[in-house]
């Protein structure tokens, strides 16, 4: 049996590291990494042309923009390695031109409690921890065999004048999350708890059909404060009987601010547009009290306020609150 028209399709995902460009300048006014991406294209184009045996010193082998014939700025084979090299912070000359990566790079989650070994921390805190996490991935949502090239290998030039790729891609994505970038969590001897946390994330989606890069950036700050009142007693009548209840009252309040933006960048047009995004304030308050070993009551109140980054959306405020009664059956 011989397959005359083999067709391969699927998706691909692998962990990677983008930390070298995580803190570079990138907003609606411009992006240093995006500028590197655009400039990388010429280096990749000349490298691919040289590997294909094209004499790039001959002006007849260059297009009007100075790129090698068949490897223009819109070529998928040029865009992909240029994109990956720029946002991973690698030297573009060392970036492989293939779609698939062979080696997954490690992500991590770290929690350090070693400060409690010191005398001062032991005498002032019940617990004290530092945390940091990082997660990043490279995803090809859909790839498939180029059946046009397979049917007629001699017709290897597309409508843009670029060499057709053996595998067609629609878009590729890079994601990165610092979850958290840092977090300090502590409980003092007097039962006061305090935590402060910062998160940072971004998602990059490159469309290989029209040369658009969509960048979603987000930052979040969280401040938490809590207090536990032990053996709080109060008198009540349940089913007509007067009883004195005793239990721990846990009070916790969190305040957070999240700011995210969606920016669309054009490869060959100096135009960056904010298409979505918002600034979101939120506050939560919770108080739970154990009426017995099995019966717990909870009071909660949540408040959120969001303000959009674009003028076509209105500010929104949401508030909710109430009581929850929880009874656990069994042991």
Image (tube, rainbow, N blue to C red):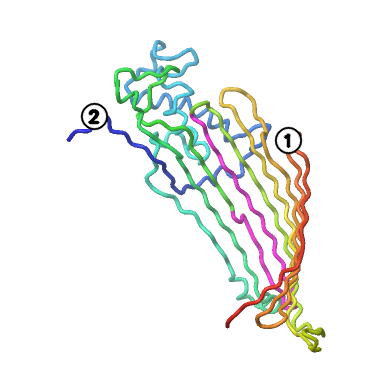
Q: Main secondary structure of the magenta part?
A: strand
Disc 2 residue crowd, few under 14, some 14–19, many 20+, Cα 10 Å: few
Question: Is residue 46 found left or right of 231 in the rendered image?
Answer: left
Q: Residue at x 78, y 49 (%)?
A: 317
Where residue 265 sits, quadrant-wise, is: top right
Using the image, tell me which numbered label, if any, was put on residue 310. 1
| Callout 1–callout 2 Cβ contact below 8 Å | no
Which element carries disc 2, helix, strand or loop?
loop
Residue 171, position as x, y percentages in the image: 48, 34
Residue 220, position as x, y percentages in the image: 68, 51
- Asked if residue 205 is among those painted magenta in the image, a careful observer would answer yes
In this view, the residue in front, 272 or 61, is 272
User: Measured along the vertical axis of the image, is residue 100 above or below residue 55?
Assistant: below
Disc 1 residue crowd, few under 14, some 14–19, many 20+, Cα 10 Å: few
| Residue bounds of the magenta highlight | 179-208
What is the quadrant of the C terminus in the image? bottom right
Question: Is residue 98 found left or right of 177 in the rendered image?
Answer: left
Q: Which residue is mark 2?
A: 4
Q: CA distance from mark 1 to mark 2?
A: 53 Å
């Amino acid at each position: 049996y011989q397959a005359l028209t083999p067709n391969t399709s699927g998706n691909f995902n692998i962990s990677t590291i983008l930390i070298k460009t995580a803190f570079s300048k990138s907003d609606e006014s411009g992006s240093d990494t995006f500028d590197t991406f655009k400039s990388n294209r010429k280096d990749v184009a000349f490298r691919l042309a040289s590997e294909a045996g094209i004499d790039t010193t001959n002006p007849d082998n260059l297009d009007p923009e100075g790129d090698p014939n068949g490897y223009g700025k819109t070529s998928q084979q040029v865009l992909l390695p240029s994109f990956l090299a720029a946002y991973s912070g690698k030297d573009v000359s060392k970036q492989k031109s293939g779609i698939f990566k062979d080696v997954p790079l490690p992500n991590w989650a770290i929690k350090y409690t070693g400060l409690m070994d010191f005398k001062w921390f032991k005498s002032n805190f019940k617990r004290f921890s530092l945390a940091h996490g990082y997660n990043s991935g490279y995803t090809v949502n859909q790839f498939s065999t180029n059946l046009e090239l397979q049917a007629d290998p001699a017709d290897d030039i597309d409508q843009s004048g670029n060499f057709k790729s053996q595998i067609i891609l629609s878009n590729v994505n890079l994601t990165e999350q610092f979850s958290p970038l840092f977090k300090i969590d502590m409980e003092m001897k007097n039962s006061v708890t305090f935590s402060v946390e910062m998160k940072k994330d971004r998602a990059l989606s490159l469309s290989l059909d029209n040369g658009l890069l969509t960048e979603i950036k987000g930052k979040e700050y969280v401040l938490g404060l809590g207090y536990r009142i032990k053996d709080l007693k109060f008198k009540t009548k349940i089913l007509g009987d007067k009883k004195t209840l005793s239990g721990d009252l846990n009070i916790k309040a969190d305040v957070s601010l999240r700011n995210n933006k969606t920016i669309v960048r054009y490869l060959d047009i100096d135009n960056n547009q904010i298409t979505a995004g918002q600034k979101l304030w939120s506050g939560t308050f919770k108080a739970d009290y154990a009426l017995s070993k099995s019966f717990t009551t909870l009071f909660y109140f949540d408040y959120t306020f969001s303000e959009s980054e674009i003028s076509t959306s209105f500010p929104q405020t949401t508030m909710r609150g109430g009581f929850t009664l929880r009874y656990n059956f069994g042991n």
